[in-house]
Image: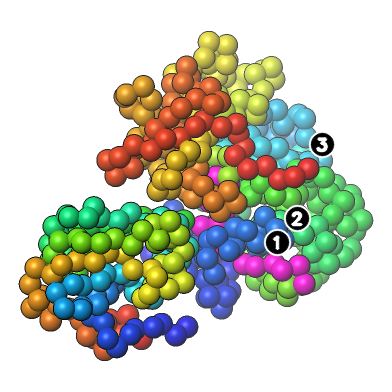
Amino acid sequence: MSTQVPADLKYAKSHEWLRVAGDVGTVGITDHAQHELTDVVFVELPAVGRKVKAGEACAVVESVKTASDIYAPVSGEVIEVNKPVSDDPALVNSAPFAGGWFFKLKLADAAEAGALLTPDAYKAQIGG
Amino acid sequence: MLKRTPLFAAHQRAGGKLIEFGGWEMPVQYSTITDEHLCVRRAAGIFDISHMGEVIVRGPAAEAFLNATLTNDVRKLVVGLGQYTLMCNEQGGVIDDLYAYRLGTEEYLLIINASRIEPDVAWLEQRLAAFPRQAELTLANLSDHSAAVAVQGPKTPGLLDLLFPEASTGGTLVAKPSELKKNQIAQFNFAGQVVCVARTGYSGEDGFEVITPATLIEAVWDATLKLGHQFCLQPCGLGARDTLRTEACYPLYGHELDEATTPIEAGVGFFVALDKGEFVGRSVLAEQKAGGTKKKLVAFKMTDKAPPPRPHYPIWAGGSVVGEVVSGTQSPSLNNGIGMGYVPPQLAEVGGKLEIEIRGRRFAAEIVKKPIYKRAA
């Protein structure tokens, strides 16, 4: 099984990815995480406008088997959520780094992203 | 240390994802739960159920002993037939639910839940010690020496006929396994040894369970996978086993059933033979059957877009909490949240509106007729 770990993203130990563009960060869960979960059947997204702290549980992804919390990898304010993934949760399985994104944050502190795992460090964590 | 079945190496070879289940290290899935679930509904799947327990009850007083201990009437069993039954305590609470098969005129096989082997055997031994005709029967717990697989799905009759091509040698006498009727059991030859094949299961589909000596099960598993290829058979884990049985509304011990819940409350009163004479729990069960119960098991479907219901979520009705979900999942067949839970009997009508509380929010659900999923006749 070849697990994708795109080189242009930052990673949290709890298997979220962060894509930074200016002061906005997009958050989703990794290919490894969706493989482990399998069959995503429900995604619960945070309210737009909610302020979250790094490490705070702010979304839920449910597979047939279980419900798992999704944590904000960095602090910020939720400025957009991915409505299509809420209507079609299977996007998390089929396109975890593209159509399967969860929400966008206006970053509170650009330096926080620097503390996340690099692609190589995340690969090492998941044994890839 | 978790217990392992004789198929542990086979699960690793098949890429099974192993989890802890009731003290056992078991495969939860090989591909995905949804994929395996739909494979059983459409074609065929094989499940390791070697963790389940086997007890043999033998002797001239075996029938009388079982009829005084279990809720169903074993006198209805001819040789080669089995029945679903329950074992209750004096308060009518369920110690276990099980299958009892009559293998010979004075020999019965009990298939019991993995997590209940110790309490069941202790209870049976305690009952035997107090049984007046105790010298006329023996109990043997074969759980460590027996193994089993469930082969489930609409394509399984043809597959079983290839696996066991000779006529049966005991139990129900048939030319081939597909001639067995529901709940019938027979002995067949496999590689020079005797295996038991019963037409039963826990998936809501047609299917069989194959019980063998522990040393033989891997050969049966391998042969089933090999011959099953042409029937699109897949190995299936406990995840699909749970979603399949939830759709079929089969109780799972520890969820729908426990020692504080009676068969009447759980909706399996059909398997309580009040007319057969005295048995453990009878007076409470008779009272409940006539006078009603304080709680009743219902099946429900989520009616709005909602997260899947899960065990222990509160059930609301009329603005207050009225019960708790005991089983719940996203139904792979219906692509909808489904579950079972206990509510007061006056709220247990089919069509009744409930709400399931999920992470602090309430989502609409409706009580539906059991089973939630039924295969086409």
B248 or B356, which is in the foreground?
B356
Residue drawn at x 83%, y 56% is B177
Residue B189 position, x and y percent, is 82, 64
On screen, residue B21 versus residue B101, left or right, reads: left
On screen, residue B78 versus residue B361, left or right, reads: right
Label 2: chain letter: B
User: Marks 1/3: CA distance?
Assistant: 29 Å
**B240 part of magenta stretch:** yes
- First of labels 1, 3 by sequence position: 1
Residue A42 position, x and y percent, is 41, 55
The nearer-to-camera label among 1 and 3 is: 1
Q: Which residues are magenta?
A: B230-246
Residue B56 position, x and y percent, is 66, 46
Residue B227 position, x and y percent, is 77, 72
User: Quick check: do tags 2 and 3 share a chain?
Assistant: yes
| Residue at mark 3 | B78
| Residue at mark 1 | B44
The nearer-to-camera label among 2 and 3 is: 2
Which numbered circle lies on residue B343?
A: none
On screen, residue B208 versus residue A97, left or right, reads: right
Label 3: chain letter: B
On screen, residue B219 versus residue B145, left or right, reads: right
User: Quick check: do tags 1 and 3 share a chain?
Assistant: yes
Element carrying mark 2: loop
| Residue at mark 2 | B154
- First of labels 2, 3 by sequence position: 3
**What kind of secondary structure does the magenta stretch mostly adopt?**
helix
User: Quick check: do tags 2 and 1 share a chain?
Assistant: yes
B1 relative to B110, above or below: below
Residue drawn at x 58%, y 48% is B334
